[in-house]
Amino acid sequence: MINCEKCNTPVNESHINSKEFAPCDHCGALILTEVFPAAVRASETDFEQENLVIEDDAGCFYHPTKKAVIPCSSCGRFLCALCDIEMDNTHICFSCLESGKKKKKLDTLETYRFLPDSLALRLSIFPLISIIFTWFTCITAPAAIYLVIRYWKSDSSVAPRGKKWRFIVAFILSSAQIIGWIGFLFIIINQP
Amino acid sequence: MTPKAIDYKKFSGKKRNFIGTDRIWIGPDHLLMVESTGVSERYKRFFFKDIQAIRILKTKTWLFRLIFVSILFLLTGALGAWAWRGNSQEIVVFPALICLVFLYYLIRLLIKGPSCECWIYSSVQKEKIKSVTSVKSGKKLLELLIPQIEALQGTLPAEKIRKERVTAKPSAILKHVSQTPLKKISKVWHRLSFFLLMIHGVFLALTLLFHPPVMLITIGVLGLSVLLLSTIAVVRQAGSDLSRRIKAITITALVFLILGSVSNYIEYMFFYMTNIETWAKVSHNQWETIKLVAEIDYFDYPILLGKEMFLVAMYFCLGVAGLLFLWKQEK
C-alpha cells in the first residue's frame, strides 16, 4: 500500500496518477504520486528452472543440472536463467560482473570516483584567496602540478564534465605561484 | 568489456550541501544521482524499468524562508532608512548592502516557487532526490521521466491500481519514517539558548545607547553564556527528533555568535592599534580596559554601528524564530 510521507496513512487510490497535487485524507499534506507498472509486476524471480532432460543438452557452467539458456557475452560460459545477469542490453555471468566492476570496465556499476582535476584546481586557488593560508602555496602549488601530470589521462566524472579545463587552469595558476616563490627566494638571497 | 560513454543530459538545478553539491543526470535508460564532495563523487542509478513510483511532497519550507527573509529585508531597509533620515549617511552603507543581499534572496525565492521533497521508489530502495527542491523542478523532472519510463514499462491503467492494490516497496525493508530511530531530547537547552539570545540582542541594542562598564560586563557574560548554551544545544540535537528548522536555527545562531565574537576581537585590535599609546598603558588592567571600551561611542564609527545593528537584528530574530518553532513543534 502506498502511504502518505507525513502521516503514514494509505493514500486514496483516486489520487494516484492524477498528475496533480492531492491532499492526504488524514493530514492534508499535498502529494503528487505517480506509480508505474513495475509496482504491480509479478516477481521476476519466479522464472522456470529447467532441469536437463536430455544428456546432450548444454548445462549451466555453475549449475550443471540446469539447462543453459544463454551464453555469457563476455566469457562465453553457458548460463541458466538464474545465473544470467542482463545489463546494458548484454547477458553476463556474475564472475564477469565482479571482474568488470574491479577493473572498472562497467561504468554502470561504478559508485565512487575520485576527481583529481577538482582537487588540483582547489589546491591552486584556495590557499591563494585565503590570506591566512597563502604561505602554504609553496606546498599546494607543486602538489597541484603533480596531480595534473599524474592524472592527466585518467577519467574524471561518470557524468559529462568540461574536458581538462580544470587541469589547465590549475597548472597555469600553480606554475605562476611556483614562479612567484622562486622570484621571492631570489630576492631574499640577493638582498644586501 | 570495453566501457562506452553514456549520453547523459543534465537536469537543471543542484542542491548545495556543506561540502559539495547533489545533482541528477538523465541517461538513456536510467537516472544518475551524483553526490559530490568537491573532490570525489558517489553515484546512485535508478533504471527506468525498475522505478515503481515517484512522489512529490509539497513542503512549507519555502513559505517560512520567504517570511524570514522578508522580515530581515524590511528590518535592514528600515535601519538604513532611519540612518539616512538621521543625517548619518555613512551608516547607511552597511545596512544597505545587507538589505540588497536579502532582496536578492527574496527575488530568488519568488522565482523558485514553492518547495517540495521528491522521492523515488524501486523494489529495493526509497531514495530522496535531494537536488529537486521546488515544485517547478519536480514537475519538470516528471515530464522528462514519465515518457521514458512508460516507453519501457507501459502505462498503469486505473482499474489495475484498484484491482492490484498497488504496493510501492520497500515496505518490508524500510519504513516511511526515518530509518534510524530518533532520540527524544529535552528542549530546555534550546529554549534557554533562544531566550538568552533574544535577551542578548536586546542588551546589545541598549549598549549602543548606554554603555557603562557594568553593561559591557553583562553583555560579555551574556554572550559567553549564549555561546555555551548554543554549543550544548547543537551537540545534543544531533540525531534528535527536533524539526529541521529548529536544528538549522540553532546552528545559524551559533555561527552568528562565533562571528560576533570574532568581530569583537577584530574591533578590539582596531582600537588598540589606532590608540596604541593609551591602550598599551592599561592592557594589563582588565577593569581599566573595560572603562576605555565603555568610552567608545559607536555613533562615531558608522561601519561598526552598522555591524552592531545587524547583529542585534540577527540575534533577536533568531531567538524569536527559534522559540516560535519550538512552541509550534510542542503544539
Image (cartoon, helix red, strand yellow):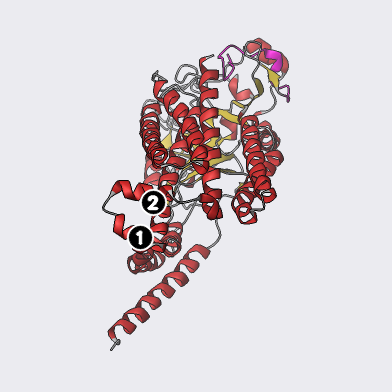
CA gap, disc 1 and disc 2? 9 Å
Chain under callout 1: B
- Estimate how packed mark 1 is, as few (under 14), some (14 to 19) or many (20 or more) residues with alpha carbons within 10 Å: some
Q: Return the residue nearer the eye: A25 or A3.
A: A25
Chain under callout 2: B
Q: Main secondary structure of the magenta part?
A: loop
Q: Return the residue nearer the eye: B323 or A71.
A: B323
Q: Position of residue A157 (x, y in %)?
A: 49, 52
Q: Amino acid at mark 2?
A: Leu
* Residue A166 located left or right of residue B86: left
Q: Are marks 1 and 2 in contact (CB under 8 Å)?
A: yes
Q: Residue at x 50, y 24 (%)?
A: B243
* Residue B303 located left or right of residue B268: right
Q: Secondary structure at mark 1?
A: helix
Q: Which mark is residue B278?
A: 1
The residue that label 2 is drawn on is B292
* Residue B175 located left or right of residue B105: left
* Residue A152 located left or right of residue B299: left
Q: Secondary structure at mark 2?
A: helix
Q: Position of residue A38 (x, y in %)?
A: 60, 24
Q: Residue at x 43, y 40 (%)?
A: B257
**Quadrant of the image for the C terminus of chain B?**
top right
Q: Which residues are magenta?
A: A1-20
Work out whether mark 1 precedes mark 2 in sequence or the reverse, and give the earlier one: 1
Q: Is residue B314 visible?
A: yes
Q: Which mark is residue B195?
A: none
Q: Is residue B16 visible?
A: no
Q: Amino acid at mark 1?
A: Thr
